Image: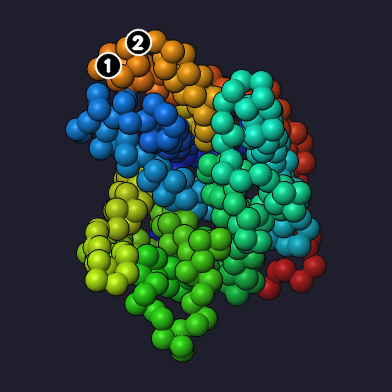
Amino acid sequence: MLQSTKPSPDSLLPAPAAPDKAEPRLVFIDALRGIAALAVAAYHIERYGPLAGPASRIIEGPIENVIRYGWVGVEIFFVISGFVIAYSLRKAWMTPGYLGNYALRRSIRLDPPYWVTIVVALALHFFGPRLLNVPSPLDDSPTWPQVAWHFLYLQNVMGYDNVSVGLWTLCIEVQFYLLYAIGLGLAQRFSGLARWQQCGGGAALLACFAPLGLISLAVYHHESAFNAPALAWLAPFKSEACVLRYFWMFFLGMTVHWTLEGRWPKWILWAYLICMAARFGWYESRHVGSGITAFVRTRWTIEVAVAGIAGATIFAVGAVGRLATLGAQRWLQFLGKTSYSLYLIHYPVSHVVVNLWDQWGSQHAWHESPFYDWYALGGTIFALAAAIAAGYLLYILVERPSQRLAGRFRREINPKRERGTAR
């Protein structure tokens, strides 16, 4: 059985509170999530819209390079999600009833802010050009089936584009929640109730999840190396609409938690990080163009490096018992608590700000002068501030009430009372 010689559930994590009290927040995870959300928002605001080019001329160099790679915040999100879901369900005994309750609470928690963002994006499409003279944030007019599938997190699976930037990750997250719950339930049945409650079941978890993680890591951005007819079954691992393509990131977060919890020995985490290092060293190659102008572009897969660093950092902080204390600065916690809302609403809000800012600036004689570059940079910064403010409002008005409502549906299951679960 794969487990530590001295089982110590949660020994390296914050001590759980009494059953009738809320458990301590993992403030380091909140801080990391907040930084990732800010990075993604800054990337989208700086790179898109009429102010992008002029503002880039002012901050070209190290600052722009940092912002240009802000999209890797998504990889950090996925690692964090793997860790947080494993942590939040560490005491759960997965049954059909608990799975239904878990799905209900996740839906209540995530859906309202997501739905509000969809409504805002659609409103900007229909009314922005007419009332504000702002171009639509959508490339094409939405259809009713497209909108309907959005509300079920299935728009990408059904072949539709997203009505706002970043919504595709929510679809992947929802798939991950379901995949994790099913895999966890299988692992628990394989290990048995008594062993699971003693922090065992490591071998069952490894059997259920490790193959998916390793295959996902190998195939990611190397689809051309797995095109043999006998490997047609790898198609889900190549699809951008399927969680299996990104599962290697979630799996890293899960591995970090199970290692800190004592359910897995440390060598499994180190082995997986070594696999990630080897994958990083395997150049990503893409054929660009066609005919005599075609060429092969190679690059390091930076997503692997960023995800690996994020996972190793979470483990290091957890190993010294600082997950509940490090990163407690108020501004980091503000970003952490509002990160979900900021991630959702930043693009629609910033889209309006940068276009209105450009409209006003274009009416002046200095529109084509170097001064406009500074003006554009100011508008970009203001757009980011406006997005943060909008994220806070969405958190206060929608997300936080949704969190409280979801908490009312939490139910604790006594595994011994569930028929057929004890062995």
In the foreground, 65 or 269: 65
Residue 369 bears which disc, if any? 1
Residue 365 bears which disc, if any? 2
Instruction: Indicate the quadrant containing the C terminus: top left, top right, bottom left or bottom right.
Output: bottom right
What residue sits 43% from the left and 57% below the top? 249
The answer to whether residue 174 is above or below residue 51 is: below
Helix, strand or loop at label 1? It is loop
The answer, for residue 330, to whether it is visible in the render is no
* Residue 63 place in picture, x, y as percent: 25, 30
Q: Marks 1 and 2: in contact by CB < 8 Å?
A: yes
In the foreground, 179 or 297: 297
Residue 50 bears which disc, if any? none
* Residue 71 place in picture, x, y as percent: 39, 43
In the foreground, 354 or 419: 354
The answer, for residue 304, to whether it is visible in the render is yes
- Relative to residue 133, is residue 95 drawn left or right? right
* Residue 242 place in picture, x, y as percent: 55, 63
**Amino acid on which the number 1 mark rests in the picture:** Ser
Q: Quadrant of residue 380?
A: top left
**Amino acid on which the number 2 mark rests in the picture:** Ala
Label 2: few (<14), some or many (≥20) within 10 Å?
few
What residue sits 72% from the left and 68% below the top? 421
- Relative to residue 325, is residue 179 drawn left or right? right
Instruction: Indicate the quadrant containing the N terminus: top left, top right, bottom left or bottom right.
Output: bottom left
* Residue 95 place in picture, x, y as percent: 73, 62
The answer to whether residue 105 is above or below residue 253 is: above
Helix, strand or loop at label 2? It is helix
